[in-house]
Image (cartoon, helix red, strand yellow):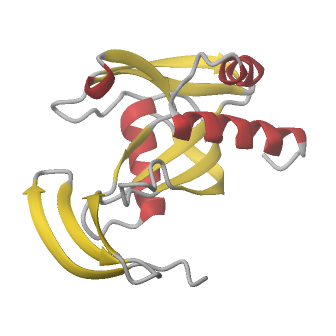
Amino acid sequence: MKLFEKTVKEQEIYSGRIIRVHLDDVVLENGSETKREVVDHPGGVSVAVLTENNELILVRQFRYPYKQVLLELPAGKLEQGEDPFEAVKREQREETGTVGEHYISLGNVYPTPGYCGEIIRLWACRASGSTGELQLDEDEFLATERLPLDKAVEMVLNNEIPDAKTQIGILKTARLVEQGKL
């Protein structure tokens, strides 16, 4: 088995401010042809910001596709050509008013690999100093919230936090704290 699909044709369906959608004709490893619907996304970053008291700084934000407010780690979209590490520090400043220190990469998350090429790069850090003013985008509305790390883990395990990047970031951060690495 080669586990590979060859793209023979790509047809753009939609190109917007954030995503691009295309319909591809592909040849499977057995020679048969099929179509793949693909969403291209520039990728994003997310950070688990941990205070000196082992509290996570989270954000509550309305998420239109679900028509509900979600509790999430601070996160954002990568700008064209932006370095992911610089982006995560920018998003942290904008959404939490904090600056981090001792950043640790938590790796990459592929949120929906069946149809979307988005990659979210995760980090964890300690917040240094006090919280400053939020610097939200003009069309961004959110509220910050501090939550003890142990409580956040409990909420993930009780299915109270449905966001995938947030679940992964919380659980990996908790493990690093247990190991004395953060």
User: Left or right: 182 with respect to 97?
Assistant: right
Residue 126 rendering spot, x and y as whole percentages: 66, 41
In what quadrant of the picture does the N terminus appear? bottom right
Q: Nearer the viewer, residue 50 or 4?
A: 4
Q: Nearer the viewer, residue 135 or 9?
A: 9
What residue is shown at x 73% (from left), y 25% (from top)?
153
Residue 128 appears anywhere in the view: no
Residue 53 rendering spot, x and y as whole percentages: 75, 24
Q: Is 25 located above or below residue 112 in the figure? A: below
Residue 116 appears anywhere in the view: yes
Residue 141 occupies which quadrant of the picture?
top left
Residue 176 rendering spot, x and y as whole percentages: 80, 45
Q: Is 143 located above or below residue 14 in the figure? A: above
What residue is shown at x 48% (from left), y 61% (from top)?
85
Q: How many marks can you see? A: 0
Residue 86 rendering spot, x and y as whole percentages: 43, 60
User: Left or right: 56 with respect to 76?
Assistant: right
Q: Is 134 located above or below residue 3 in the figure? A: above
What residue is shown at x 24% (from left), y 65% (from top)?
80
Q: Residue furthest right?
A: 179
Q: Nearer the viewer, residue 179 or 11?
A: 11
What residue is shown at x 43% (from left), y 20% (from top)?
70
User: Left or right: 32 with respect to 13?
Assistant: right
